Amino acid sequence: GENVEQHPSTLSVQEGDSAVIKCTYSDSASNYFPWYKQELGKGPQLIIDIRSNVGEKKDQRIAVTLNKTAKHFSLHITETQPEDSAVYFCAASDTGANSKLTFGKGITLSVRP
Amino acid sequence: DAEITQSPRHKITETGRQVTLACHQTWNHNNMFWYRQDLGHGLRLIHYSYGVQDTNKGEVSDGYSVSRSNTEDLPLTLESAASSQTSVYFCASSPANGREKLFFGSGTQLSVL
């Protein structure tokens, strides 16, 4: 089955700097890659997702890039702010009614003011 | 506003007791899911439903059951609670095919003593 790994497990950046969180996946059939942000005491929230027919997607300060050959995808956050501090989960899935979504173990991002 | 709510937010129970966690969504989504979140494991799927009267096992379904009698609710039952089921439980719903674009509730912290 699919195996999704995130690295590093924790990341600390200075406010205003960029942060990059990387994930690798094992199943070449995976074609949908979402990122979820979980703030303390809350449920995960979808912040951006990408499909395998697209190499990059941006939404304001966040972007996701996908390298299908190397089977990895990354979340990029520019101009980080303290409110970006959270746990970030990547996931991978094939599509369809019987698809299986596999989450990584999560990365804790801390933005130092 | 449409939302997904879980209750209770916190629950303490004893080993061997039956426990039911509630999940209610007002988006009219067909797809609903239960995940558990444990340190070092990320999010793992317990059960899911793609519509009324439809239920399916996830990757960690042993000791859990669900029922779907209407679109809005997917209660999760622990038949005989065990200490290994101490965890944070998240319910999610999705308007899309498969497991895309999940909307998560705020979670239930369950402690089995």
Image (cartoon, coloured by chain):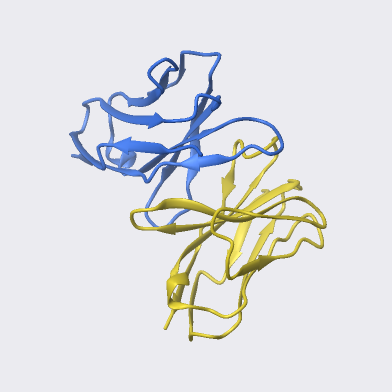
Q: Image quarter for residue B16?
A: bottom right
Q: Image quarter for residue A60?
A: top left
Height in image: A85 above or below B40? above
Residue B1: x percent and y percent? 67, 48
The outermost residue toward the front is A1
Residue visible at 33% across and 41% down in the picture = A83
**B27 left or right, relative to A102:** right
Residue A31: x percent and y percent? 55, 24
Viewer-side residue, A65 vs A13: A65
Colour assigned to chain B in the rendering is: yellow
**A68 left or right, relative to A52:** left
**B14 left or right, relative to A61:** right
Residue A63: x percent and y percent? 41, 21
Height in image: B74 above or below A60? below
Residue visible at 73% across and 61% down in the picture = B73
Viewer-side residue, A91 vs B108: A91
**Total numbered badges shown on the rendered structure:** 0
Colour assigned to chain A in the rendering is: blue
Residue B29: x percent and y percent? 73, 46
Quarter of the image with the C terminus of chain A in it:
top left
